[in-house]
């Protein structure tokens, strides 16, 4: 009986069934897409960790014999071991351990260490990799948010979809309250009614679930391929992602989709089955408009049609709340995203490209090489097309600055008194500050001396005598002033580390360096100075001087850098050719890494465009939830309101007036998210402008008005289309049949 009833109802009420099927399809599509992307993001992170850190799960350092190593290899659940001598003291070795059972890594590693007599301090875990498998060491204090983020997004999506699909089922089921009241009066039990409604839900949703899941997999595959094309594999720190899909992901997606739809159908079915027969029979199945639900604004603007539309919307308020929130969130997210990327572009142009666009074309890092042992500088400068090549290395020292050395300008904003103790420390002789040392090859240092207008010498240092006004928070347009008075001809440098002896006093390890000049000009390098530590005192010295003092100072970096310029207005093809020549000259003797400025710019633009596309896609998906809800409710409520429209027409209301009523409803539903979002977006963007110190006029000149208007028109258009479909059904109704039908079958 119930099977025949359900099949008959579905057959004779295609619009109601269609709204449920659309909602189920959107649910399956979105959940399949999210879980597919989550799985590939998880797989990508694991691949990245393995490329950067290796696939080991734990490490043990110690003095091991061959017998100890064999015992580790033969330990239960150990899959493989690798001897790693990097980062340990001889005669220690480090054993990288790979396990078959990831869940037993923590316990088994400690057991191995205990067996070998190694303390727990010598045990290291690959926390980032283990976190990907939801294995967390209690001693690991770093937050691992990837899985919690996945679960949060999936939970929010499921909750939103439950509300969307619940509304679709509720509209369909509420239209038959009177029918089920009659069934109850003749002996139907609440369980039978619930079973009937749930079997209808199953029949309507099986095909949309399968199609939605399949389409979600295909779209996630397309997004991965699109991300590879947009972001590129040549971006530093990124590798090409290969799409993967595990059968367990499909099972999880199907179970989550079925659970979401079942909960959505069960809630209205449970509510409906608990009505008494008398309550159900009294219900006519039509939308009840109460006189008190008026909309003065709509009445004033659109007359009677506005009043009727306002009343209908107020009755539907609860059902349309989810649609409105989804459209508000999607429009707000899209607007903020577009504004953020516009601000980011302005900031990048006014910072990075303003500082570095003309100072380098090719940047080469010579790994594990000191600048004084690099002998290819002259050969590099001799390459055709190379305008300049500066070879340098970085080191770190410290220096005490006495109070009487500080400039009057610096004293005007408080001097060292306003400095924190993170970078500056008070001593008996003055203030101990960090001194970054930039070691230039002799030719580059001589050219730098000529640049600042002094006689080139190779026996002294040039001090960058500039400090930022730390009391001025405007980082976009900072105020600079002289750091020191510039009277001392000697700079006493100390070792950067271990500056205190056992008595708590400063060590005597220091060196006197002649000061050639105090200047506010720096060499044309791709380097930032005093960005975190505003009080650092940068020294530039030639490599000849560094050879004499490095034994006393130490603290040099491991790598040497080469900053090169090509000809004016150089093209990408020319830079590629120059980069090839440079690599062929030095790559055979040194381990190098090279960068191409134009390639970096293009890769950066590609990465930003890819991020915008991906984030924009999620905004569109969020909008689809709201639009799907609008479609579901519109088509469902139009059917439920057939008697209402029939009564309007019976008292003389024309189809044009009903069409106007529909237009007012569509205008209100689509306009509400826009009029709520725009003021919020203005407030948020205003805050971002204030925080980033970008001028309002500068932002308005590049504001993403066209994309925002396009998204706004898309919301208007989709809501209007939903009401158009509803209007097509209404204009075809038979007045006599609708008024005669008291069951709204």
Image (spheres, helix red, strand yellow):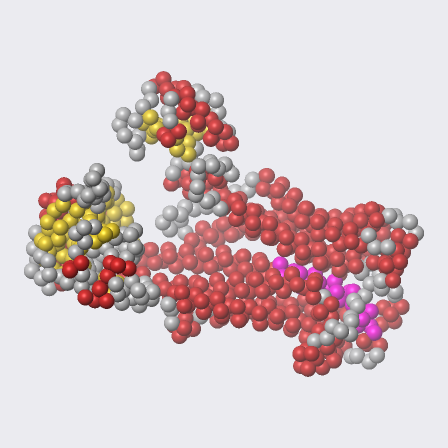
Q: Nearer the viewer, residue 10 or 632?
A: 632
Judged left or right of residue 471, residue 156 is: right
Q: Which residues are drawn in magenta?
A: 625-647
Visible residue check, residue 515: yes
Q: Position of residue 476 (x, y in %)?
A: 33, 66
Q: Position of residue 6 (x, y in %)?
A: 82, 52
Instruction: Indicate whether residue 635 is drawn in magenta.
Output: yes
Instruction: Indicate whether residue 218 is drawn in magenta.
Output: no
Task: Give the quarter of the image for residue 669.
Answer: bottom right
Q: Nearer the viewer, residue 479 or 659?
A: 479
Q: Nearer the viewer, residue 452 or 257?
A: 452
Judged left or right of residue 302, residue 682 is: left
Q: Residue at x 74, y 56 (%)?
A: 169
Q: Position of residue 479 (x, y in %)?
A: 27, 67
Q: Residue at x 56, y 60 (%)?
A: 620
Q: Residue at x 49, y 42 (%)?
A: 43
Q: Residue at x 20, y 39 (%)?
A: 503
């Amino acid at each position: 009986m119930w099977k025949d009833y359900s099949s008959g109802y579905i057959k004779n009420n295609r619009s109601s069934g269609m709204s449920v099927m659309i909602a189920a399809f959107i649910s399956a599509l979105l959940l399949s897409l999210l879980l597919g992307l989550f799985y590939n993001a998880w797989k990508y992170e694991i691949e990245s960790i393995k490329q950067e850190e290796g696939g080991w799960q734990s490490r043990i350092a110690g003095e091991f014999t061959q017998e100890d190593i064999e015992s580790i290899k033969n330990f239960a659940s150990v899959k493989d071991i690798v001897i790693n001598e990097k980062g340990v003291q001889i005669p220690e070795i480090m054993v990288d351990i790979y396990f078959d059972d990831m869940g037993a890594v923590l316990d088994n590693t400690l057991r191995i260490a205990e067996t070998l007599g190694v303390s727990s301090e010598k045990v290291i875990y690959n926390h980032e990799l283990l976190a990907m498998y939801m294995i967390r060491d209690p001693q690991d204090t770093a937050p691992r948010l990837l899985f919690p983020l996945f679960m949060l997004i999936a939970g929010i999506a499921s909750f939103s979809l439950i509300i969307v699909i619940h509304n679709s089922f509720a509209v369909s089921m509420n239209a038959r309250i009177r029918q089920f009241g009659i069934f109850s009066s003749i002996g139907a039990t609440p369980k039978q009614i619930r079973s009937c409604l749930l079997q209808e839900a199953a029949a309507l949703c099986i095909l949309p679930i399968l199609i939605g899941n399949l389409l979600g997999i295909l779209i996630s595959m397309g997004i991965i391929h699109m991300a590879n094309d947009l972001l590129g594999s040549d971006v530093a720190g990124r590798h090409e992602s290969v799409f993967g899909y595990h059968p367990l992901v499909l099972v999880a997606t199907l179970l989550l989709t079925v659970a979401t739809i079942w909960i959505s159908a069960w809630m209205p079915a449970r509510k409906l089955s608990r009505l008494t027969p008398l309550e159900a029979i009294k219900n006519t199945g039509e939308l009840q408009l109460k006189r008190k639900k008026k909309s003065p604004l709509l009445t004033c603007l659109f007359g009677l049609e506005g009043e009727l539309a306002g009343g209908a919307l107020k009755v539907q308020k609860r059902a349309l709340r989810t649609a409105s929130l989804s459209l508000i969130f999607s429009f707000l997210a899209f607007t903020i995203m577009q504004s953020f990327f516009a601000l980011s572009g302005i900031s990048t142009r006014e910072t990075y490209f303003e500082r570095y666009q003309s100072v380098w074309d090719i940047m080469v890092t010579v790994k594990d090489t000191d600048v004084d042992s690099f002998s290819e500088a002259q050969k590099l400068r001799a390459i055709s097309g190379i305008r300049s090549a500066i070879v340098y290395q970085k080191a770190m020292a410290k220096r005490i600055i006495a109070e009487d050395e500080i400039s009057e300008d610096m004293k005007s904003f408080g001097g060292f008194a306003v400095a924190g103790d993170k970078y500056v420390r008070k001593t008996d002789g003055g203030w101990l500050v960090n001194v970054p040392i930039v070691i230039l090859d002799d030719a580059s240092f001589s050219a730098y001396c000529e640049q600042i207008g002094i006689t080139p010498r190779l026996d002294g240092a040039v001090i960058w005598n500039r400090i930022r006004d730390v009391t001025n928070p405007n980082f976009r347009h900072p105020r600079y002033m002289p750091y020191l008075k510039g009277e001392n001809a000697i700079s006493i440098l100390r070792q950067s580390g271990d500056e205190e002896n056992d008595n708590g006093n400063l060590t005597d390890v220091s060196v006197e360096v002649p000061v050639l000049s105090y200047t506010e000009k720096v060499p044309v390098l791709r380097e930032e100075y005093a960005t975190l530590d505003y009080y650092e005192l940068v020294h530039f010295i030639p490599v000849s001087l560094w050879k004499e003092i490095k034994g006393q100072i130490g603290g040099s970096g491991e790598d040497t850098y080469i900053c090169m310029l090509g000809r004016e207005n150089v093209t990408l093809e020319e830079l590629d050719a120059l980069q090839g020549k440079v690599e062929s000259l030095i790559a055979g003797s040194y381990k190098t890494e090279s960068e191409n400025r134009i390639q970096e710019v293009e890769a950066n633009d590609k990465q930003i465009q890819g991020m915008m596309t991906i984030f924009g896609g999620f905004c569109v998906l969020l909008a689809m939830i709201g639009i799907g809800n609008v479609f579901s409710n519109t088509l469902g409520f139009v059917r439920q309101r057939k008697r209402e429209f029939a009564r309007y027409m019976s008292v003389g209301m024309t189809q044009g007036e009903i069409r106007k009523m529909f237009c007012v409803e569509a205008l209100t539903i689509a306009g509400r998210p826009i009029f709520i979002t725009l003021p919020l977006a203005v407030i948020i963007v205003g805050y971002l402008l204030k925080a980033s110190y970008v001028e309002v006029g500068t932002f308005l000149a590049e504001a993403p008005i066209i994309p925002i208007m396009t998204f706004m028109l898309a919301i208007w258009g989709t809501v209007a289309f939903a009401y158009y479909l509803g209007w097509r059904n209404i204009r075809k109704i038979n007045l006599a049949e609708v008024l005669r039908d008291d069951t709204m079958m």
